[in-house]
Amino acid sequence: MPDSPIAVEPHSPELRHHFADMEQQREASSLGMWLFLATEVMFFGGMFCAYLIYRLWYFPEFAAASKSLDITLGTVNTAVLICSSLTVVLAVRAAQLGKRHDQVVYLALTLVLGLAFLGVKGVEWTSKFKEHHIPGASFHFEGTVPGHPDQPVDQQHAQIFFSLYFAMTGMHALHMVIGVGIFSYLLYQAWKGRYTPDYYTPLENSGLYWHFVDIIWIYLFPLLYLIDRKK
Amino acid sequence: MSEHIVPLKTNVAVWLVLLVLTGVTAGVAFIDLGPFNTIVALVIATCKALMVVLIFMHVKYTSERLVKVVVFSALFFLLLLLGLSLADYATRLLV
């Protein structure tokens, strides 16, 4: 542009005009993502807080209801999510190293693992539905107080556990569904070779989101499935 | 870019430790430790979460201090929420 009054220095085509350089642009978007995750911490924090209070008040019912959850499926699902976090890390790494093929492979693996998690969750919810463990008019829980086989648990208190169980795993699953949507888009973009060592911010920030959802599950698993298994 | 690239070995090691800790936390739940069952489960979960945040989410390597401020403030306000709520609800039966 010989007639331009402002001299424009050569820069990456990915640089938006309001940033000084790519480094500043990357750090700004990373900070924005972390601020969003901080609000997500408080969002899930409210549910964790409700869980803690009711668990203190109605511990026998929480322990009995926790035992009705399938610990094998819960453990497998935790492992599935941890594996998906690794594939996300490797996809971001592939972008940093400029390997398009590896990015596509790892993103596809992430999607498969994410969908596997949701599938297992669906199996668990279906069996809860059949056992009448969904809070509502037809709710019924057969459990007894741990250590007292002759003492049936309070139905209302057990219902509170399952309300929290479905609210927390449901919100987590909704985040997983959104994550699967985001990663489908990333897979398509990576396939087109959109992400290079110079610019892979969407991949990096979506990775942060995926790891955050993984961390929520890391806490949900012991809090919901492992309350009082020993008796 | 100046972004730190984490070695493959580190990522795989973290992944393996996370899987082992998942097995350990599920196994320990069946051993009677009294009130320590909950404490052990939460300590293991926190170790796992720390590894994910520091290494998978690159917080350990970031040069951006504001990111660390945001991480600490999220943690601080979460603990404020849980701590002050429990200071009320957990002590009501003592009165």
Image (tube, helix red, strand yellow):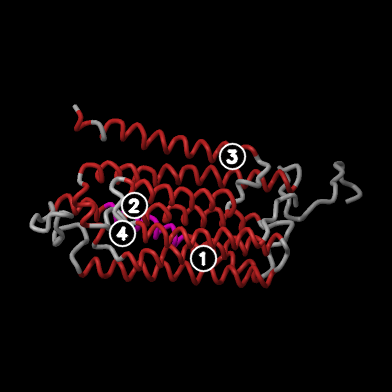
Pointer 2 chain: A
Identify residue type, mark 1: Cys
Q: Which span is picked out in magenta?
A: A164-178
Question: Element at badge 1?
Answer: helix
- Camera sees residue A36: yes
Of the two numbered discs 1 and 2 on the same chain, state the one appearing first in sequence.
1
- 3 and 4 marks in contact (CB < 8 Å): no
Q: Which residue is mark 4?
A: B30
Q: Which residue is mark 1?
A: A83
* B43 over A173 or under it: above or below: above
Identify residue type, mark 4: Phe
Locate residue A132: give its quadrant.
bottom left
* A89 over A100 or under it: above or below: above
Question: Element at badge 4?
Answer: loop
Of the two numbered discs 3 and 4 on the same chain, state the one appearing first in sequence.
4
Main structural element of the magenta stretch: helix, strand or loop?
Answer: helix
Pointer 3 chain: B
Q: Report how far apart the C-alphas of labels 1 and 3 lie in the structure.
A: 26 Å
Q: B33 or A161: which is nearer to us?
A: B33
